[in-house]
């Protein structure tokens, strides 16, 4: 190697060593915990939301944008009290997810949270008024699963897309069941997916199977997400079992 090339390489190495490696915000670690423990202190979601808004302003790393997209979804689901607040939160989640995709298009989590916020925004806004979003949601979930076939959350959201959308517009209960079962193959204690499976089986007229899956949610002793199980899944399973009593 010539002296000039060695000198140039040395300059490049010095320049690279002067750039500090990105240090993950501690807020992202806190968010990982809060996502499964928020039932103990829901107000912590307010602090994390504000903190991650500040984080993307001072350090616009893709991981921070993904974190903001994730907390926006959680805040909309758990803390928002009006339809307007929910729509605003999910829209912010979509924006943050899109920014993360722009910066890291091969990041499965960026694709997932963009799709999830978009799907929830559409669900909140009404299926008829937001049916145009379904292809976008499916596209990003497909990319998520292409990047990471074991992404249980993507199977879950895809299952609900097939479950919620009318058949004439692409809904399919067989595909919904397949997606929920795929999520459960990845995480057998994923009670949100089991609720989805129970609902799908009930709609397909498989009442005994639906009751069995709903009861399994209530009987679960080690749910993968304790907060969701406590706040949402047990409630939804009980409501389904009550509704199915009339169909025995």
Image (cartoon, rainbow, N blue to C red):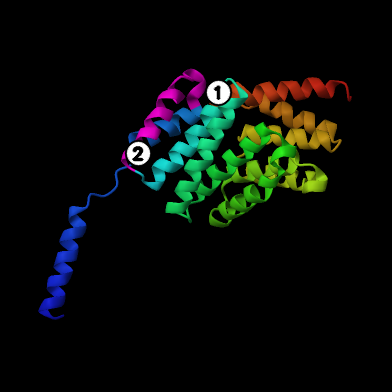
Q: Residue at x 56, y 25 (%)?
A: 85
> Which type of secondary structure does the marked residue at label 1 adopt?
loop
**How far across and how far down the image is residue 38, in percent?**
49, 24
Q: Is residue 87 left or right of residue 42?
A: right
Locate residue 88, reporting x and y percent. Answer: 55, 31
The answer to which quarter of the image holds residue 17 is bottom left
Q: Is residue 140 left or right of residue 7?
A: right
Report crowding for label 1: few under 14, some 14 to 19, many 20 or more residues within 10 A (C-alpha): some
Most foreground residue, 243 or 223: 243
Q: Residue at x 12, y 71 (%)?
A: 7
Q: Where's residue 176, x and y in %?
A: 74, 44
Residue 119 visible in rendering: yes
In this orientation, which residue lies closer to the viewer: 230 or 208?
A: 230
Residue at screen point 71% across, 43% down:
131
Between 186 and 40, the one lying in front of the other is 40
Mark 1, residue position: 80
Magenta-highlighted residues:
37-59
Q: Which residue is mark 2?
A: 57
Whether residue 223 can be seen here? no
Residue 248 in the magenta stretch? The answer is no
Residue positioned 64% across, 41% down in the render: 157
Q: Regarding mark 2 in the picture, which secondary structure is present there?
A: helix
Residue 243 spot, x, y in % from top left: 81, 22
The C terminus lies in quadrant? top right
The earlier-in-sequence mark between 1 and 2 is 2
User: Does the stretch in magenta take in 45?
Assistant: yes
157 vs 17, left or right, is right
Q: Main SS of the magenta segment?
A: helix
Q: Residues at badges 1 and 2 in contact (C-beta under 8 Å)? A: no
Tag count in the figure?
Answer: 2
Left/right placement of residue 140 relative to residue 21 reads right
């Amino acid at each position: 190697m010539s002296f000039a090339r060695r000198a140039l390489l040395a300059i490049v190495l010095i320049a690279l060593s002067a750039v500090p490696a990105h240090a993950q915000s501690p807020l992202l670690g806190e968010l990982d915990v809060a996502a499964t423990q928020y039932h103990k202190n829901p107000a912590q979601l307010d602090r994390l939301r504000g903190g991650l808004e500040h984080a993307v302003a001072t350090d616009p790393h893709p991981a921070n944008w993904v974190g903001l997209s994730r907390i926006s979804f959680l805040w909309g689901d758990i803390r928002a009290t009006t339809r307007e607040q929910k729509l605003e939160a999910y829209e912010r989640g979509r924006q943050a997810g899109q920014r993360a995709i722009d910066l890291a298009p091969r990041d499965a989590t960026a694709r997932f949270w963009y799709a999830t916020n978009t799907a929830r925004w559409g669900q909140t806004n009404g299926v008829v008024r937001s049916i145009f979003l379904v292809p976008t949601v499916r596209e990003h979930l497909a990319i998520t699963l292409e990047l990471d076939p074991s992404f249980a959350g993507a199977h879950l959201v895809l299952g609900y897309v097939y479950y919620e959308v009318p058949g004439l517009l692409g809904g399919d209960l067989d595909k919904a069941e397949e997606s929920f079962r795929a999520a459960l193959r990845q995480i057998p204690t994923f009670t949100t997916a089991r609720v989805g499976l129970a609902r799908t089986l009930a709609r397909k007229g498989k009442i005994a199977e639906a009751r069995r899956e709903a009861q399994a949610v209530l009987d679960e002793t080690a749910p993968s997400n304790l907060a969701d199980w406590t706040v949402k899944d047990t409630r939804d399973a009980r409501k389904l079992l009550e509704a199915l009593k009339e169909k025995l």
